[in-house]
Image: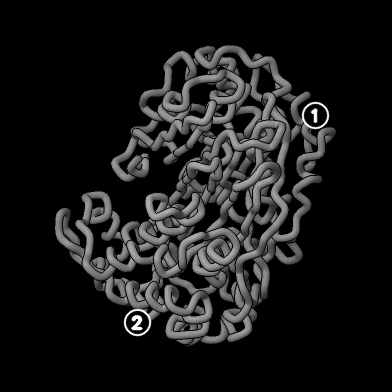
Amino acid sequence: MLELGGNAVDAAIAASAVLAVTTQHMCGLGGDLFALVHLHQGAPACINASGWAGSGADPARLRSEGHTRMPFRGDVRTTPVPGCVDGWDALARRFAILPLATLLEPAIGCATRGFEVPAYLAAASRRVRGVAGADDYQDLVPGQIMRRPDVARMLQQVAESGREAFYGGEFGAALLALGEGEYDQADLDHVHADWVDPLSIDVWGHRVWTIPPNSQGYLTLASARIAEGLELPDCADDLWQHFLVEAARHAGFDRNDCLYDGADGWALLDPQRLAARRANIRPDAVANLGDTYAGGGTIFLTAVDGQGGGVSLIQSNASGFGANLVVPGTGVFLHNRGNGFSLTPGHPAEYGPRRRPPHTLSPALVTHLDGGLRTVLGSMGGDAQPQIVLQMLTRLLHNREMPAHVVAAPRWVLEPPDSNNFDTWYEPDRPNVVFEPSGSSTWMEGLERRGHRVERRPVNVGHAHLIDLVDGVAFAVSEPRISTSAAVAPAG
């Protein structure tokens, strides 16, 4: 798209659409999307394309069925109206240079002509064995050519007539039938893509931007501000790891009480609020939060253009193939982002009609204090996204490491035992600190000495990417831990 004369938004939409075809186990037309767009000096534009729960959402009914938490899979009530297509449409209308049909053409081609199935997709397809409508994903083997004609048809309709053809056409009608009263036509007529004011903080001589609630992005900013006020040593020191773990814990321990649709993001970043949390952090021991306070299924991509514009875009099914539900006749898998709702009566994030659920998606963007773009970055990883971005920001802005090392350096995440990546903060004192295999034994021993519960697992922690602009040169780094990422430059 850049070679055709498009800008960073054109490139991001096209890449997002291709991924919706080829990585259905992480994202798709039935999921949500957030993006930060910086095409001019100053604050980035910020789009929240996450849908609301249908007008038929009834928390009392779920409680009467014995549910204490939202169903995770196999239940349409865990699927708010998908916002992804609304996000593409809104981004294209406001910023794209090229026609939407041109932007979706590569995705339509992948779905029509087919693409080679990689080993990771063949393995992931076992999760939807026997799911109605998932016939294309039965018995996949690496190397075979996979075609998705139903998804190609959905994309072609969007290319020709925009969001109305999707929500008001074949997909919308089939979703209403599948929902059996969970949604009504007004839910689908409503545009689930809002331009909202981003949140920002000044930290380490830069301004860091993210999405406001219902996104958990405020945790990235809060933890960075807490960490900035600590005397951070070199990152090889285990005290550096301890301080960042504590900053993430103190920023996020009350997330489940504070994060909901309509929460005041600026209040969550109040300097006095964060200073009090920083003051509780000790260099020699883990803090007991209970004594102090009262208390993937995602893809991430970045794009920049030759004019200095940049996009940080994240798109998600929530967990794997989402709700393991396919809208009949469309090939579209539905996300399960409604798992973020509460079923506690009166909770500010209680499941209910026309409410957006708390969202893990939290892309980030960094500008210089004069408003010029510095970095677009982010990661997949459920609750851990702000923790991963915090580690990247600290290495990039405080330690001034090269972008390639920022992404490749060993990482940790906070997880409770038996985590599904969405319940870190249900028991906030204290989650385990989970290190990748390459994590230093010195780090682990130092954290254990201070009272942290630490473990090492043979897993990758997050899938992170960034593009850093320095003196007019773009340094693009994709996740080296996996085969499902790439950094691509246009010819010339």
The C terminus sits in image quarter = top left
In the depicted structure, whether residue 306 falls above or below residue 129: above
Question: Is 172 left, or right, of 136 in this rendering?
Answer: right
Question: Is 87 left, or right, of 21 in this rendering?
Answer: right
Question: Is 438 left, or right, of 399 in this rendering?
Answer: left
Mark 2 → mark 1, Cα distance in angstroms: 54 Å
- Nearer the observer, 311 or 224: 311
Three-letter code for the amino acid on which mark 2 is drawn: Gly
**Neighbours of disc 2 within 10 Å: few (<14), some (14-19), many (20+):** few
- Nearer the observer, 48 or 345: 48
Give the image quarter of residue 450.
top right
In the depicted structure, whether residue 366 falls above or below residue 353: above
Q: Are marks 2 and 1 in contact (CB under 8 Å)?
A: no
- Nearer the observer, 358 or 22: 22
The percent coordinates of residue 306 (x first, y second) are 48, 42
**Helix, strand or loop status at disc 1:** helix
Residue identified by numbered label 2: 329
Can you tell which of label 2 and label 1 is closer to the viewer?
2
Residue identified by numbered label 1: 275
